[in-house]
Amino acid sequence: MIVLKLLLVPAMVGLVSLLSQRFGQGVAGLLSGLPVIAATVTAVLMLEAPRESVAAIAHASYAAIPAAFAYTLAFSWVARWIEPRHPGPQAAWLLCLGGAALAFFVVGFGLQALPIGHAPRLLIALASPLLTLALMPRQPGQAPIAFRIPRVELGLRMAFAFLMAMVLMWSATRLSPAASGLVLAWPITGCVLPCFTIALYGSPATLQLLKGFANGLFGFTCFFAALASLLDAGLAAGPAFVLSLLAALAGAWVLLQLRRQRAAG
């Protein structure tokens, strides 16, 4: 399972980076936010673990999602703030990553401390993308931004993603259960791609990427929310997984339409 995830993470980063060259940063962000890695790992887990364990993981996964949205929102606003100041590429990605990491852990540990059940956590998770997209910086009428990514940069992106996945998994085995769950929810693709983008291509491309990422994360939320609910209801693992995938795609599509309507208005 660990080896599978370690291989999937850099592969996903490489694939999304290549697609961004053709379809733009917004599409790349959308795909990286969708539960491609998580769904694959979950499918393997469902073959090995009991239903109760998979349902518990699904509940924990969507409960940690608001922290990822806080990360996305903070990264976006720091990127927007530094745009006219031009602090240099290294300072730019470090400032953005630092602000985003702070928001992630503050929101993540704050929500863990709340004495609430599954239903309120689910409502918070489902409301997070709407709030995030409403509060993100606006880019009215901007065309998709795509760049030619050199092979060296592509290799560095994948290597950085692989190393980050290794560090996070190693750290999770040495922390408390609450901290481990939050560390494993850290958005690896949502970290690698924006950091390279802000350093090399600037704030406008980064904002497009992160808006797409937030859109895809809603699909991630829908996947685990549906999976947890269907498994709790007693549905067989196979049908529950398929329906959860459909819920992820439907959720991402609906939110994309809402974004387009908001942009047009």
Image (cartoon, rainbow, N blue to C red):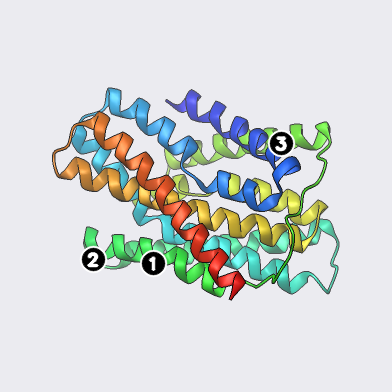
Q: Residue at x 64, y 65 (%)?
A: 76
Q: Dots 1 and 2: beta carbons under 8 Å?
A: no
Is residue 180 in sight in this rendering? no
- Local SS, label 2: loop
Instruction: Sort mark 3 into few (<14), some (14-19) or many (20+) by Cα contacts within 10 Å.
Output: some
Question: Closer to the N terminus: mark 3 or mark 1?
Answer: 3
- Local SS, label 1: helix
Question: Closer to the N terminus: mark 1 or mark 2?
Answer: 2
Taking the image as shown, residue 51 lies to the left or right of residue 219, namely left
- How far is the residue under mark 3 from the one under mark 1? 31 Å
Q: Nearer the viewer, residue 88 or 235?
A: 235
Q: Residue at x 80, y 59 (%)?
A: 202
Amino acid type for the residue under numbered disc 3: Leu
Taking the image as shown, residue 62 lies to the left or right of residue 141, namely left
- How far is the residue under mark 2 from the one under mark 3? 42 Å
Percent position (x, y) of residue 5? 49, 30
Taking the image as shown, residue 116 lies to the left or right of residue 253, namely left
Compared to residue 2, the image places residue 200 above or below, namely below
Compared to residue 30, the image places residue 235 above or below, namely above
Is residue 47 in sight in this rendering? yes
Q: Residue at x 47, y 60 (%)?
A: 255
Q: Which mark is residue 138?
A: none
Q: Dots 3 and 1: beta carbons under 8 Å?
A: no
Q: Which mark is residue 127?
A: 1
Percent position (x, y) of residue 65? 42, 56
Amino acid type for the residue under numbered disc 2: Ile
Residue marked by disc 2: 116
The image quadrant where one finds the N terminus is top left
Residue marked by disc 3: 18
Amino acid type for the residue under numbered disc 1: Ala
Q: Nearer the viewer, residue 18 or 82?
A: 18
